[in-house]
Image (cartoon, rainbow, N blue to C red):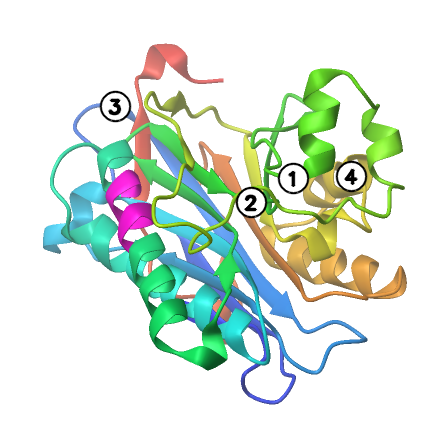
Amino acid sequence: MILPGAADGGTAARAMMKTTRQLGEMQRLFVSGAMRSDPGRVRANNEDRVACVIPREGDLAEGRGLLALVADGMGGHAAGEVASLIAAETVVRVYYEARGTPPEGLAAGFAAANQAIHQRSRDDAACAGMGTTCTALAVCDNQAFLAHIGDSRAYLLREGEIRQISDDDSLVGALVREGAISAEEAGHRPDRNVILKALGAAPVAKPTIWRDGMPLRSGDIFVLCSDGLSDLVDGARIAETVRRLPPAGACEALIGAALEAGGHDNVSVGVFAVSDTPPLPEAPERVTRTRSVAQPAAEAS
């Protein structure tokens, strides 16, 4: 499912998903999640794009597991929307078509998306110079894999502590990693949105791809978001919100917090919670299909 931010004239897009399949004799884990995007209070267009796919049981793509992503486009008039849509559609398609491991599928998807966006920007004058961030989370069997480029973010809340698990490919992000400025200083600099890497910005992209998966634990909560959220809502507020609310409610609350703080950019967020018990039923209009991941019982929390 690929969702435009506000292509329908301003209605925020959202998706709900749950997972429920047992793999062998391993302990079942359940992943529930939601995604939402909002144009914000200032911009007329939404250049963000969110996507999530959960293959049905028996589908050929089932072995790939869950894939969710956030893309934040940039460029001239409407070009950012084009770049983020190409990224979302291409990464999803190639990830499920590619053979090999999940990291290899993510790498192939990002490479294909970069090529498609870069070529479109060369062929279409209206799209010249466009590009997009992209942060993708794949959950396959008992592991999570991340692919990332740009300054959209991925967070993990584990055992009550939240940490950013993606590195910002931005000027201030590089300065923070070098120790030249603090993370707090980075949030106040006027150049904090200067991006160093993006899909489509060069003939060859250099995303960060996790080659080794992160074993899931019951209680883990993953958050994907564009900088329209992370620029206005700090990690502590994100942690408190996703700890207190189920994924759909957390997405609503985080979007609301960004809007209350000014909403000067498009805002997109996805929240994915891991549990060893089935999630409670949701309202019929919000529930889609279900699927499960698993981890050995010895590793369960």
Residue at the disc numbered 4:
240
Circle number at residue 26: 3
The amino acid type of the residue labelled 3 equals Met
Nearest the eye: 119 or 13: 119
Q: Provide residue 229's location: percent of width, then percent of height.
A: 72, 53
Identify the residue at image location x=35%, y=24%: 213
- Figure quadrant of residue 160: top right
Asked if the residue under mark 4 is in contact with the one under mark 2, i.e. CB atoms within 8 Å, the reply is no
SS assignment at label 1: loop
The amino acid type of the residue labelled 4 equals Glu
| Residues shaded magenta | 106-112
Can residue 110 be found in the magenta stretch?
Answer: yes
Mark 4 vs mark 3, CA separation in Å: 31 Å
Residue at the disc numbered 2:
150
* Earlier sequence position, callout 3 versus callout 2: 3
Identify the residue at image location x=39%, y=13%: 299
